[in-house]
Amino acid sequence: MKPTAKILADIVDEVRPLIGQGKVANYIPALASVDNHKLGIAVYTNQGEVICAGDADEPFSIQSISKVLSLTLALGLYTPQELWLRVGKEPSGQAFNSLIQLEMEQGIPRNPFINAGAIVVADMLQSRLSAPRQRLIEFARKLSGNPSLVYDKVVAASEMLHSDRNAAIAYLMRSFGNFENDVLPVLNNYFHACAVRMSCVDLAKTFSYLANKGRMVHGGKQIITETQSKQLNALLATCGLYDGAGEFAYRVGMPGKSGVGGGIVAIVPGDMTIAVWSPELDSSGNSLAGTQALELLSKRIGRSIF
Amino acid sequence: MKPTAKILADIVDEVRPLIGQGKVANYIPALASVDNHKLGIAVYTNQGEVICAGDADEPFSIQSISKVLSLTLALGLYTPQELWLRVGKEPSGQAFNSLIQLEMEQGIPRNPFINAGAIVVADMLQSRLSAPRQRLIEFARKLSGNPSLVYDKVVAASEMLHSDRNAAIAYLMRSFGNFENDVLPVLNNYFHACAVRMSCVDLAKTFSYLANKGRMVHGGKQIITETQSKQLNALLATCGLYDGAGEFAYRVGMPGKSGVGGGIVAIVPGDMTIAVWSPELDSSGNSLAGTQALELLSKRIGRSIF
Amino acid sequence: MKPTAKILADIVDEVRPLIGQGKVANYIPALASVDNHKLGIAVYTNQGEVICAGDADEPFSIQSISKVLSLTLALGLYTPQELWLRVGKEPSGQAFNSLIQLEMEQGIPRNPFINAGAIVVADMLQSRLSAPRQRLIEFARKLSGNPSLVYDKVVAASEMLHSDRNAAIAYLMRSFGNFENDVLPVLNNYFHACAVRMSCVDLAKTFSYLANKGRMVHGGKQIITETQSKQLNALLATCGLYDGAGEFAYRVGMPGKSGVGGGIVAIVPGDMTIAVWSPELDSSGNSLAGTQALELLSKRIGRSIF
Amino acid sequence: MKPTAKILADIVDEVRPLIGQGKVANYIPALASVDNHKLGIAVYTNQGEVICAGDADEPFSIQSISKVLSLTLALGLYTPQELWLRVGKEPSGQAFNSLIQLEMEQGIPRNPFINAGAIVVADMLQSRLSAPRQRLIEFARKLSGNPSLVYDKVVAASEMLHSDRNAAIAYLMRSFGNFENDVLPVLNNYFHACAVRMSCVDLAKTFSYLANKGRMVHGGKQIITETQSKQLNALLATCGLYDGAGEFAYRVGMPGKSGVGGGIVAIVPGDMTIAVWSPELDSSGNSLAGTQALELLSKRIGRSIF
């Protein structure tokens, strides 16, 4: 079945009662103050159709979803050999910001979607781009087709004020020789990437290349190769939802990436890109109502990849 | 493109040079003595066609691939609530026989495909079946359509002689209240399940229900529900290849399950079931040439789920 | 200052109000049912004088204090090379029954006073003694001068019924080749050793050889060499109080060994042996009031080794 | 027996053949370039007598031995409640620079003698002293009676260039709220403390207060209370030799503190202070020949505390 505005609206209604059962991310004030009743969903088909419901046009902090953008940029700057020497491709089985495994595995992060891995990717962008921060936001604007995308400077600054854990991660990797630049500028870029504000519609458009063999649906530009697109989806399926990737695959059956801002992007390869937003998180740090909305949608339109 | 005998034969030729670069499992003599030059592949389509190449008809020890059989049996005996209370659905990020995470997570194994999880499932079968060992082999015979399947008693006995690590795992779970029966009989059943001998063709037929919405291709019997089939494939995709699930998804792009006997089963949902066999393993314990064969096949016939 | 009955009686009065602030060990019923108001202290000087207060003559379950007895026996059966190949001499920094470090360190327990280490010692006794259980109780009778010492069969049987964690430890060591005999008989001996019942007076006399250069005060028999006596005291000082050895050294300043029955033995080398008993434990598993009594005694008679 | 120049000279001769069996610390060039044949020993008795042999007057980098100085300073600035809230008193059971336990235990270091603990102490000094670096060197000059002690600026600068691991530790503690100041200045002070150059004679004099109930032998000034002196010796005995404290207690039987520069200070409470120096280290990071020299001395003069 094709997704329709009616199906999405129904799903929004059905999952709304979950609001109140999760917890908004509160480690920085700028995230803690978000309205927990926000709830949106957008589908962007490979035919270029946008279908949405709820607060699908309202921008929010994409947070870790930006890790997919950064990795995509890095894929254009490094050979696979170079890239996968510095970061792995396996699920971590641990909290997203843990240093334990990182120490045991000699400073090589498990995958690019835990903090350590994304910070290595940020370090790699810093080494090869003259203005990585500018480059990333322009990339997001191009992919989303939304030229007004900006960094939320308040969020980025607030993250920097609470950056100790991520600084510890970066310095630990540096002690193992897996970090090339000064720590603080790289973290600043990393936090800016997390602080991009996008709506569900923006997100669904942005990641349409992952549903479309590496090619943007609008404009048709090839962003990465078809093979890279499959590989990235594979990484999302095994590592994209922190320590809840198994549960997400079990319930939703799509590659996806979540952020602590409450957004989740999910991919139906060859078919469509979906973005949901609901700020309250479950115990794994993934949007509670958002996951449920994706599970319902997956069942209703029959789009599990499994 | 459809898989053909020619494609499979070509792939067998192409991966054969990898033999010599891996290591045959040698923790028990019965496995160590296998001929490392064996190499087979079989495809079983949802239309009931068998295509194969190499040593596809020669039986070998399926080892951990049996964990999928046991879990499938357990799905028929327990509610999801009962089952998933005792074992998780997340990748472990650790070696398949580690006790570290098991102790930290209070005796609840991360997923049913690491040793601890499969031993819990064996314990659950023991609690609800009067003759679990007999039941399992009959189940394998029915699914494969091969009435001559038997346990390799020498392998099972040899495993029992080297069972200390798994006994430690079982006793640790018992100390946390997550084990109901006597340890040794459960381990004995567990090792027997690992010691079933099947060929690539047997395996591809056996797991055809996972490619066919829960229904056996031959005979048409519904083994599990369509939803359960998707869920099982999701678990295989995130947890089916020990600590190499991410790499396997990245390279092959299919849900799969490997065993230290050198077999791997891979599922193309809605389409076909594939089994490969090559006894030499990579550093994660997965068949080296087998993985490469699946990667080539996935690319050649364009069947990645991503 | 010399210890006197008055000093001991005062200390007993002073620490009694702590009763109620700790927790009696409750993992087996036989221990949980002990009267938590019991409180005793005994000093046995190297001149052969016994001074005591409170319930110093009432026997209780010595539990882990038996680990010193077993190690002393093993010192007579094995060369240091043989012994210290199978168990280390370092504090563990972890809970007494953890398997994490044991797996990381390839089945070699950190020291003979955590469970894993004591179980290895029990395995070593089993390998070289025809009747280790009989031998141990006779050894305890000889050292204490109390021929009526017996195993508490109810406690030993109860421990066997709750032995899963220790069985996991033993099997894990066996999987690493650091265990020679069948697991259950060794555990049975281990639990019997823990189930010896002794009074504070018995304990103080039993371990007088550690305060007296390896020689029993009464009878004068050399049990171990003077060097071994120093070595054993060193091990007690760094590893004798589970994960509370640092705090005990800081507060009491004597080598010591505690048991979850609430007993603690402390050694003043060259001077005296002290035993206290109060069943309630602190968060590290050491007697709460007992530790406080030893701290007061150490200060009052000025006998810290530091 | 009293220590004599002859005894010390004999010991130096006896342990010299060990040179070549250890490894000089090489993580910074300034340490790696030290002459590995240096070997010295000095005894400072509570009667004020200095006895020495070998290169006892040659200054070297005291490295972690400075952690005792810093802690002693902190004892004068903070109440025990304040101090021991931020750092523990237990052996770590792990490498001196590991972050694993630090993360598991919520940013509270196990003891003040592993890196994390010493960095917390440096942070505490920074919070309460206007010029902590100046204060520390003056303290060392006063204690040693050597007004010419200085920081080795080359070593300190070199440590700062290799400070990533310690920066990771500091930031991790900051993320748990257990770090008050900017990380880099505190690390800079910490590395300066490590870079003090002292000879064996300087060191033996400096720490004479630990052998003399808290009072300097020369000058007679009370540095810490007698109780604090006992407590500090207790901490040294259980935590002073990285992950080799048990072995050191077993072999030498004295509280001690080692540094990767190859120095070790050992205390005989009530009697004397000993310092040895030999740059090659064993696998735990303690001076190989130095430990052996202390073991021989302990046996020859009969001064084990056990």
Image (cartoon, coloured by chain):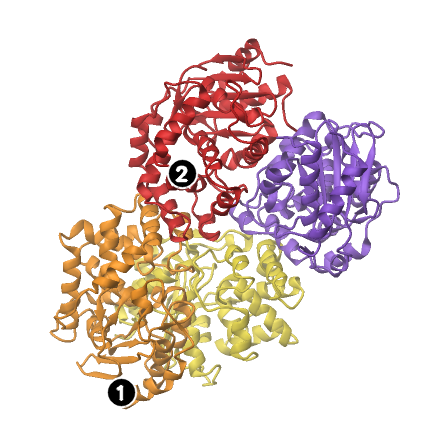
Chain colours: A purple, B red, C orange, D yellow
User: Is residue A306 shown left or right of residue C195?
Assistant: right
Spatial CA span between label 2 and label 1: 66 Å
Few, some or many residues within 10 Å of mark 2 (<14, 14–19, 20+): many
Examine the rendered structure and indicate whether residue C29 appears above or below residue B179: below
Q: Farthest residue in the top direction?
A: B6
Q: Which residue is mark 1?
A: C2
Instruction: Specify the quadrant that holds the C terminus of chain B.
Output: top right
Chain ID of residue with mark 1 = C
Task: Examine the rendering and report whether any part of residue C71 can be seen.
Answer: no
Chain ID of residue with mark 2 = B
Few, some or many residues within 10 Å of mark 1 (<14, 14–19, 20+): few
Q: Which mark is on residue C229?
A: none
- Helix, strand or loop for disc 2: helix
Place of residue C153 in the rendered image (x, y in percent of width and height, measured from the top left) = 21, 62
Kind of residue indicated by mark 2: Leu
Q: Are marks 2 and 1 on the same chain?
A: no
Place of residue B266 in the rendered image (x, y in percent of width and height, measured from the top left) = 54, 25
Kind of residue indicated by mark 1: Lys
Name the one closer to the observer, D281 or A100: A100
Among the 4 quarters of the image, the one containing residue D55: bottom left
- x 33%, y 47%: residue: C173
Name the one closer to the observer, C125 or D172: C125
- Helix, strand or loop for disc 1: loop
User: Is residue D16 shown left or right of residue A183?
Assistant: left
Q: Which residue is mark 2?
A: B125
Among the 4 quarters of the image, the one containing residue A134: top right
Instruction: Specify the quadrant that holds the N terminus of chain B.
Output: top right
